[in-house]
Amino acid sequence: MTTNELFPLVDAAGNVVGSVERRVAHANRTLLHPVVHCLVLNRRGHVLMQKRSTTKDIQPGKWDTSVGGHLCYGEDVLAALRREAAEEIGLRVDDHGVRFLYRYIQRSEVESELVSTFFCCAEGPFVPQASEIDAVRFWTPEEISEHLGSGLFTPNFEDEWARYRRYCEDGA
């Protein structure tokens, strides 16, 4: 991760309307930039989660979505998904039936992201990127529910989890 990465700026529909440096995007919540998430579940329905490195600039040391990352300027969502999954946990998502779930806008106190969420099923082995991730492990849905609101997870993951549960309940 470098602080001068160039991110695309997008409108709510995902159309690229400009570009911005990472440090600027993370300091101005009026600038919407795209990210990709992938929920990785095993055959038993347990969710792979990553523990963010304590050196991360946002939400260090908290448990987060299986895979998540920013799109680079000029990169499409699927290319970003493939890149992030390979970099973060050593997963080739094309080998695991990746499927698009939904898109939404996530706003925090520091940034605004247009999130495209995907799903795939994989058992591992996983190879966490040491500079980004301190650990990975599968969590049962019950374990996740027990720890919601405790500060163990990133706020983004808690929002993602609620969206995913609603998505599943709606019969998708």
Image (cartoon, grey):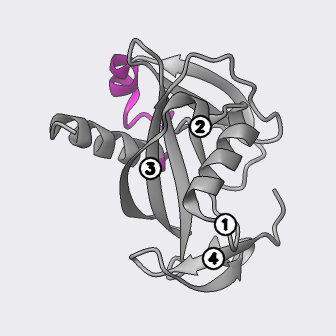
Which residue type carries mark 1?
A: Glu
Per the rendering, the mark at residue 8 is 4
Local SS, label 1? loop
* Mark with earlier residue (3, 1): 1
Q: Is residue 142 magenta?
A: yes
- According to the picture, the residue beneath numbered tag 3 turns out to be 117
Badge 1: residue crowd in 10 Å (few <14, some 14–19, many ≥20): few
Front-lying residue, 72 or 56: 72
Q: Which residues, given as a range, are shown in magenta?
A: 141-156
Horizontal and vertical percent position of residue 35: 56, 60
Q: Marks 4 and 1: in contact by CB < 8 Å?
A: yes
Residue 22 appears left or right of 159 = right
Q: CA distance from mark 3 to mark 1?
A: 16 Å
Pair 1/4: label in front: 1
Local SS, label 3? strand
- According to the picture, the residue beneath numbered tag 2 turns out to be 94
